[in-house]
Image: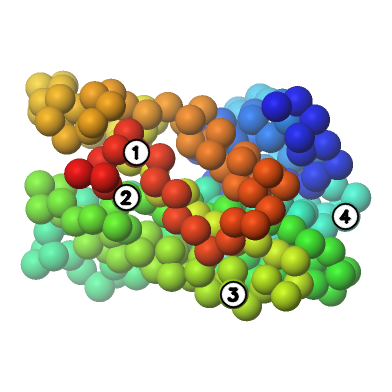
Amino acid sequence: MPGRMAGRRALITGGAGAIGLACARRLLAEGAEVVLLDRSADALAAAGIGVSPVACDVRDPGAVAAAVTRAAGLLNGPPDVLVNAAGVYRIAPLLDLTPEEWDDVQAVNLRGTFLAGRAVAAALIAGGRPGSIVNISSTAGLVADAAEPSAHYNASKAGVLALTRQMAVEWAPHGIRANAVCPGVIDTPMLRMMDDPVAGAAYLRTGVPQGRLGSTEEVAAAIAFLASDDASYLTGAAVPVDGGVTAI
């Protein structure tokens, strides 16, 4: 929808990742100005989509605050759209999972979402501006899967959902909406690295009602809708983008 996001200023964490880049392309196509934030400066440089990059580790409160200030300078105003796409995925059975592995996943997926959301909301509230936050959760935050043990990841994404709801109710009086998307099996490099073609085909036949992988562009379309004024009365929601997996 060209022009739907005209005049909006967007900051995307995890901006060099597959979903982050797809979201950047979608928001740019709809007229937004975009800044990408990622902890890998090299990945940002290689993204090649012609937007301003900011290198930042979302686990670090000081770095996040400085990055949001830097983004505001690049965008000529505080971001009024924040997409929290920074995340890591790990697999480990609960009995093998170490406290350090648990903490590492929580730090990026949940703490990072909290820190970026807080910094952007504070800037918007200080300036009396409305805005929209879209957090990336996962169907793993809604349902468990014994065949793919990832308690640390699942817990972090369930935490993102609870955090999103709290952002929504606390910041609604300031005109800030907060929603989450819950991607299912999406065709990304991370998924392909773990691909077992035989098991994957069987899962798509029996576990996904639509019978196929989702695309990053489909996730980005949902994010763009939630960020836009078309979703002006929608806050605190969790939207599965999963081909019907969680409907089973």
Query: Dot 3, crowdedness within 10 Å: few (<14), some or many (≥20)?
Result: some
Residue 202 location (% of width, % of height): 11, 26
> Circle 3 — which element?
helix
> Circle 1 — which element?
loop
Name above or below for residue 118 compared with residue 37.
below
Q: Read off the residue under disc 4.
A: 77
Residue 5 location (% of width, % of height): 76, 38
Mark number, residue 169: 3
The kind of residue on which mark 4 rests is Gly
Q: Are marks 2 and 1 in contact (CB under 8 Å)?
A: yes
> Circle 2 — which element?
helix
Name above or below for residue 183 compared with residue 146.
above
**Mark 3 vs mark 4: which is more N-terminal?**
4
Inter-mark Cα distance, 4 to 1? 35 Å
> Circle 4 — which element?
loop
- Looking at the rendering, in which quadrant would you find the C terminus? top left
Residue at image position (37%, 60%) is 157
For this view, does 215 lie left or right of residue 98? Answer: right
Q: Read off the residue under disc 1.
A: 242
The kind of residue on which mark 1 rests is Asp
